[in-house]
Amino acid sequence: MSEVSGMSTSDQVNLLDFDVDGLVAWFAGLGEKPFRARQVMRWMHHEGCDDFDAMTDVAKSLRAKLKDIAVIRPPVPVRDSISADGARKWLLDVGNANAVETVFIPETNRGTLCVSSQAGCALDCAFCSTGKQGFNRNLTAAEIIGQLWLANKLLGAARDAATDLEAGEKDNGRIISNVVMMGMGEPLANFDNVVTALRLMLDDHAYGLSRRRVTVSTSGIVPAMDRLREECPVALAVSLHASNDTLRDRLVPINQKYPLRELMAACQRYLERAPRDFVTFEYVMLDGVNDSEAHARELVALVRDTPCKFNLIPFNPFPSSGFLRSSAERIRRFAGILIDAGIVTTTRKTRGDDVDAACGQLAGQVQDKTRRTVRLRQVTEER
Ligand code: SAH
Ligand code: SF4
């Protein structure tokens, strides 16, 4: 169970808060067999079912009991926007006037869901609009896995409507093939709830995604990286953003606690267990700040002993950030130095920026608590 059962009424348990082992244990407390828990799990996560009455192969007496004491309650979408490039963004009400965002990015051979882990973030990276909001609270496991639950359901409904399926018929082609924990918040600062949600993403009774297709992105909380390696190793992305400690201390303040030497060592330890044999380093391109040829050469030396790929992210501006995006030419030259050193380097296409869904722009319009309340009221009223 998550520490904050934000989406349940006080006396009802939200079953989306459990991974498979957790649900089996909770069912055992009711005197129910493990296979019953797995049956309900499949209804919830394979079928997107939130109604116990619809679980036709579950004994009627158990359904009645569950209706009394439990709910299946994902977060509530208060806005659904589709970008011109096909990215789709949901703003989700997580209570107490907090909203988080989930973004779906369709590509030719895959569909990636970008999931949030916290309302706000305490780590205060200099170039990040989520960080500028400050920290509100951790999302529950139900609110994290609920983003996948909801997106599957809403995207499935849209696809079924667009194809010629009869009512009740299903096209089982997977719409969401990849999940990246790159939405709002620092996933490793909400460790237990994130790991519960990750286990559901991987479990065949729930979403059955491959470990290679589930990525946790972290700003570098070293002890939590070691725990993740032990408890649930999935693909790892690390937000590097600087080639030396002086610069990283300023851009990613958690670096003052876990400097680059420790971060690189943690990446190497992680790779001993990781499903992929490289770490992805994310590097936001900030004009005149971290994007010179000297920085690129310093990076090459820094990552010499760490198998890695680089993902350069052109900075996504937001009001009063104080930073500018590097020019395409500067990014090209920077990438060239990494590539010449034999490092696979891609430059991220900016997706969804017409609906403020690009990296670091999430909930850019809901920066302070007062404005967020007003904003949430507005979007709720728009429904
Ligand atoms: N907290 C985690 C994951 C969420 S942020 C982390 O920091 O890794 C996902 C990525 O977007 C991170 O690499 C983050 O540094 C980057 N990012 C944040 N703000 C950005 C902005 N304004 N423009 C471009 N990338 C940004
Ligand atoms: Fe938090 Fe990541 Fe933003 Fe840093 S970049 S403030 S860790 S969400």
Image: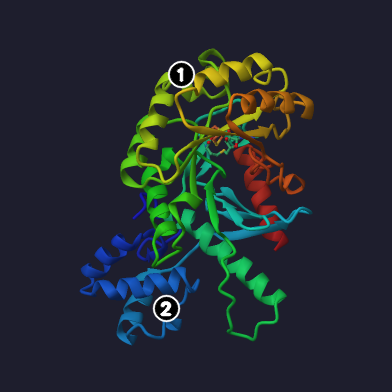
Residue positioned 39% across, 36% down in the render: 271
Judging by the rendered image, the residue that carries numbered circle 2 is 52
Residue positioned 59% across, 24% down in the render: 341
The residue mark sitting in front, 2 or 1, is 1
Residue positioned 35% across, 37% down in the render: 272
Residue 267 placement (x, y as % from top left): 42, 31
Residue 232 disc label: none
User: Which image quarter holds the C terminus?
Assistant: bottom right
Residue 322 placement (x, y as % from top left): 71, 23
Q: Tell me the element at label 2.
A: helix
Left or right: 62, with 28 as reference point = right
**Three-letter amino acid code at the position of disc 2:** Phe
Relative depth, front residue between 28 and 138: 28
Judging by the rendered image, the residue that carries numbered circle 1 is 256
Relative depth, front residue between 89 and 161: 161
Spatial CA span between label 2 and label 1: 49 Å
- Local crowd size for mark 2, using a 10 Å CA cut-off: few (<14), some (14–19), many (≥20): many
User: Which image quarter holds the N terminus?
Assistant: bottom left
Residue positioned 53% across, 17% down in the render: 301
Relative depth, front residue between 295 and 245: 295
Relative depth, front residue between 187 and 178: 178
Cβ of mark 1 under 8 A from ligand 2: no
Question: Which quadrant would residue 5 be assigned to in this image?
Answer: bottom left
